[in-house]
Amino acid sequence: MSKMGKKVSYLKGLAEGLGVSESSEQGKLMHAMIATMETLADELEETQEKLHELMEYIEEIDSDVSDLEEAFYAELEDDDEDDEDDDDDEDDDDDSGMIEYECPHCGTVVFFDEQAFDMEQEHLCPNCHRGIFEDESDEDDNEDDDGED
């Protein structure tokens, strides 16, 4: 029983002990007031119990959210570490002896072995099959040659 419930019970017992009769107008009023306070005390007690249950439930949810946050941020940290490892791997690729060129005609990225690369040799793009290292003047000459035929 709540503190309010005990006080209402005390008032009820006091009214009975004083012999407050429900037949008088004041007695009717006092009994009605005590009954109202008794109802309010019961509802207050129920509300407090529900509030306590909700507080426990909220604490459980808060704990679960904290666990999820920890797992989420731990996953993000792992991803960041993996990205750093990937960055390290990319740096290692730079030391792999490969040369990267972009085809001036179609934009395809082409890789050549640095030790086997010969600038005198014609290197064709695997996508558009045009020379990757053609000079613009060579292209102009080719266009002029085509026009002269």
Image: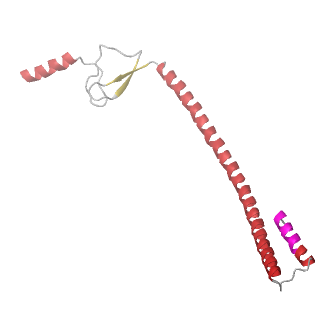
* Residue 9 in magenta stretch: yes
Q: Going 33% across and 29% down the picture, which residue do you hit?
A: 108
Residue 125 at x, y percent in the picture = 30, 26
* Residue 122 in magenta stretch: no
Q: Going 30% across and 21% down the picture, which residue do you hit?
A: 123
The residue nearer to you, when weighing 59 against 96, is 59
Q: Is residue 17 above or below residue 2?
A: below
Which color scheme does this rendered protein use? Answer: secondary structure
Residue 76 relative to residue 8: left or right: left
Residue 121 relative to residue 81: left or right: left
The total of numbered circles placed on residues is 0
Q: Going 73% across and 65% down the picture, which residue do you hit?
A: 47
The residue nearer to you, when weighing 129 against 36, is 36
Residue 107 at x, y percent in the picture = 31, 28
Q: Residue furthest bottom?
A: 23
Q: Residue furthest left?
A: 149
Residue 136 relative to residue 90: left or right: left
Residue 78 at x, y percent in the picture = 61, 35
Residue 5 at x, y percent in the picture = 83, 68
Q: Residue furthest right?
A: 17
> What span is in magenta?
3-12
Q: Is residue 49 above or below residue 109?
A: below
Place residue 45 in its image quadrant. bottom right
